[in-house]
Amino acid sequence: LGAARALHGVLEGQTPEEKERIKGEIFDDMDTRSWRRRIEQIRSEQDTDPLLAEQSILSNCSPPANVVPLGFLEREAPDLLEAGRNFADYHQTIDHHHALIAKVKEANKQRKESHEALEVAIQECVRSIALAPDAAVALLGHPSAIPKKDRRLPGHPGYRNLSIIREQRGEYGDAIRLCEEARAQGWARTDDWDKRIERCKKKLANEQGTRS
């Protein structure tokens, strides 16, 4: 009520055009202060609750919501605007990764049924591996994708299954390369990359010794 009386006092005696201009400036200022408070709140959440901050960024700083307008964000908080875009990309990449891994697991169940089924399993592994570097970045950059207490990547069935197939075929060099890639990207050590690398190196050395 006090604010309304103050506004009435400011507008009293002004021309209709001047009244509209003054009201526009006042309400623009109110919006600006509201947007700045929202940005400050999100920044505080980033320090105390990254998952809540992500949800706030997506609901306030990303299309189609844009509670805080894009133009204002570009000027006042470009990092939050970029974070909103990254989170949207992360969601898409993570969904794609999980879909590919599901296909890898399904194909792996059938790979011993026929040569054709084995080739399908190999191709599904290759497809999932192609996305693996981006999936690793997305999973680690997404607050809710991995439990807060364990900021490590899970296992990667695509790398694991294909390295097993390569080893079984005697393609030890390829098996070693796959395990080294998975290990370098940070996919879970529960997949025993080190053990498989060591085992394949011994087999490769024995094979080369036999040939010589």
Image (spheres, grey):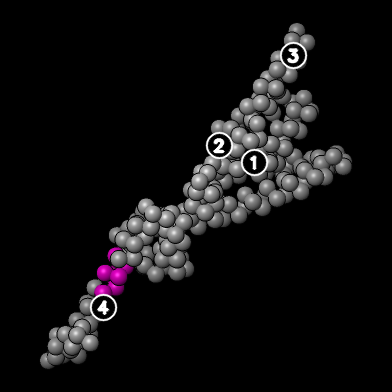
Question: Label for residue 156?
Answer: 1
Give above or below for 20 relative to 61: below
Does the rendering let one see residue 200? Answer: yes
Alpha carbon of mark 1 to alpha carbon of mark 3: how far? 29 Å
The foreground one among 123 and 155 is 155
In the image, taking residue 188 as reference, residue 59 lies left or right, namely left
Q: Earlier in the sequence, mark 2 or mark 1?
A: 1
In the image, taking residue 11 as reference, residue 51 lies left or right, namely right
- Neighbourhood count class around disc 4 (C-alpha, 10 Å): few under 14, some 14–19, many 20 upward: few
Dot 3 falls on a residue whose secondary structure is helix
- Neighbourhood count class around disc 1 (C-alpha, 10 Å): few under 14, some 14–19, many 20 upward: many
Residue at the spot of label 2: 186
- Hey, which quadrant is residue 49 in on the image? bottom left
Looking at the rendering, the stretch of residues picked out in magenta corresponds to: 30-36
Alpha carbon of mark 4 to alpha carbon of mark 1: how far? 53 Å
Callout 2 touching callout 3 (CB < 8 Å): no
Q: Amino acid at mark 1?
A: His
